Amino acid sequence: MATDRAAAQAPRSLDMIIVGAGFAGLYMLHKARRMGLDARVLEAGSGAGGTWYWNRYPGARCDIESMQYSYQFDEALEQEWHWSEKYAAQPELLEYVEHVIQRFGLAEAIQYDTRVEAAHFDETANRWRVRASTGEEFSARYCVMATGCLSSANVPHFENKELFQGPIYHTGQWPHEGVDFTGLRVGVIGTGSSAIQAIPIIAEQAAELTVFQRTPAFTVPARNRPLTDEEEAAIKADYPSLRARAKQQILAFDIQFNERRGSEVGAEEIRAECERRWEMGALNWYGAFADLLTDPHTNEIVSDWVRGRIAEIVKDPATAQLLTPKTIFGCKRICADTGYYETFNRANVTLVDVSEKPIEEFTARGLVVDGREYAFDAIVSATGFDAMTGSLNRIDIRGRAGQPLREKWAAGPRTYLGLQAAGFPNLFMISGPGSPSVLTCMMTSIEQHVEFIADVVEHLGSNGLVSIEPTVVAEDQWVEHVNEVAGGTLLNGCNSWYLGANVPGKPRVFMPYVGFPAYAEKCRQIVAAGYEGFALRAA
C-alpha cells in the first residue's frame, strides 16, 4: 500500500508542460506532438480559448480581420474554415478553437480546471517541477508559459464594494450563461476597449445606463459586416501573398500601409487620408502615414480630425467634450467600435466624469461620486487587465537558487526577446514582455514564437544539450533596446496598459517591442549566430 501511495504521489514526468489552452498553448501542443514530445496543456478554465474563453461580455469580438486573425501554419485549415464576419465575434472564435482541437487531435493532451500554482526549477535534475490546484505535481524538461498577454483581469479596489446588493460583473470574467440587462439600471465603470464594445449593446437593453469614465479613448468605426463568398474566395486564392505582406508590416497584419510620411504632405492631404481611413475602419488607421507614431505634427493633425468627428456625432457638447481624448492618437491602442459615440445620444445613457473626482465608495444601492449616490441593479467593471506580466506574476515561478520571477521583475519585466529570462533555464514565454505581442496580430506573433521554441528544443536534442537560458548581459541589452525603440515613437506619450499604468503600484515600463519585421529578423540573426546571447549547457 505504501508503495502504491508513493507512486500515486510521484510527479507525472513529461517532456513539456504548457500552461494555458489559448491560441498559443494549442499551437505549442500541436508542434510538440509533431516533434514526438510527451506534452500536456494545463488550463485553469473549463474549456479552451484563452482570452476568448473568459471574455464573453456583450459585443466581444476581435479588432483584426478574421481572415488574418487565424492560424497560418496549415494551408488546409486556412482553406476549410469559413468566417462569417469581417471581424469575428467571441462565439465564432471559440467554434474555431474547438475545430482546431478536433482537427489535430489535441483534446486528449489538454487538462481543464487545472490552475498552475507553482513552477520551480530543479537544478540537479534540470527539470521543472509544476504544482497544480488539483494537488497534482508534474515534472518536465521544458515549461512553456502560454498564459496570454490579456488574460489576468484587473479588479481594482473600491471602498465598501462588498456592500452592494446587486451583481458586479467583470468583462474579463463574464458569466458563461450570459447576462440579461433588460429593464435594469446599469452602471459601467471604464471606457476602454471592452467597455466600448459592450456599452452600445447594454444600452439597448437597460432602462438606464450610467458610464463612469476616467480617461476617454480614441475609438473609430470597426465597419464590421458579413463576409461575402466572393471576398472569402479571393483571399483564400492568394492567402500566401496576404500572409507574406502582413509579416512585412509593423503590426504583422495588412493595414494597407501608406509609406508616405505626413511631414511630406500638406494638412489637407492628411485630412483626406483620415476620411479614407474612417471609412476603412478599425486598426487600418495605424497605416495612415509612415510617421503617424513618430512625428508629433502629423499625429496632432490626425488627432484633431478624429476629435472633430466625435464633436459631430455626439449631440450634447458637454458630453462630446468629455468623450474627446486629449492624448496622442495611437499611444493607447486604438479601439474599434460599432455605434459607440452614437450611444451617448440615447436618452437612457449618462456619462459621468471620474477623472478628478473618482468613485468614493460603493453602497448597498450603488456607488458614490462627488457626494452623489448613483443607484443600480447591476454594475459592470470594464477595468481591463494586468497586461503582459499579470498572469505570470500570479504563479509562483522560481528559477536557479530559488529566485522568484516576480522578485526579478519587481522593477519591471526583464527578458531576452520576450522569450526567456536569465536564471530560468528551459522556461519559455510565448508573447512575453519584450516581444511584439500586443502591438501585432497576436496570431502571427504566437506562431513565430512557437516555431522559435520548437527549433530551440530540436537544437538542444540534436546537440546533446540539456538547457538554454539568456545571459544577463544579453538580457540587459535587450531591455535597453526595447526601451530605445519605444523611445523613438510617441507610444510613451500617455499612461497606457502598455506601460502597466492601469494597475496601481505596477512599475512603469514599456513592455512590448515595437515592430514585428525587425524583431523577426533579429531572431533569425541570433539563431544564425549559434543562439547568440543564450547560454547552452551540456549534461
Image (cartoon, rainbow, N blue to C red):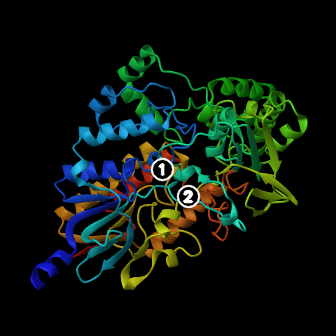
Q: Position of residue 105 (x, y in %)?
A: 21, 44
- Amino acid type assigned to the residue bearing label 2 in the image: Ala
Could you tell me which residue is drawn at 63 percent across and 60 percent down?
A: 499
Whether tag 1 and tag 2 are in contact, CB under 8 A, the answer is yes
The reply, left or right, for residue 522 in relation to residue 34 is right
Q: Which of 8 and 151 is in front in this view?
A: 8
Quarter occupied by residue 139:
bottom left
Q: Please name whichever residue, 434 or 1, is drawn nearer the observer in this view of the structure.
A: 1
Q: Mark 1 points at which residue?
A: 54
Mark 1 surroundings within 10 Å by alpha-carbon count, few (fewer than 14), some (14 through 19), many (20 or more): many
Disc 2 crowd rating (10 Å Cα; few below 14, some 14-19, many 20+) is: many
| Residue 264 relative to residue 422: left or right | right
Judged left or right of residue 432, residue 534 is: left
Q: In this view, does 334 lie above or below 390?
A: above
User: Could you say where residue 119 lies in the image, as x and y percent from the top left?
Assistant: 36, 73
**Residue name at image x 41 percent, y 18 percent:** 234
Instruction: Specify the amino acid type for callout 1.
Output: Trp
Q: What element carries label 1?
A: helix
Residue picked out by circle 2: 153
Residue positioned most to the top = 230
Q: Residue 343 carries which label?
A: none
- Counting every numbered tag in the picture gives 2
280 shown above or below 387 = above
In x, y percent, where is residue 478? Answer: 51, 64
Quadrant in which the N terminus appears: bottom left
- Upstream in the sequence, badge 1 or badge 2? 1
For numbered disc 2, what is the local secondary structure?
Answer: loop
| Residue 535 shows in the view | no
Residue shown at 57% from the left, 26% from the top: 224
Q: Which residue is drawn at 62% across and 39% down?
A: 197
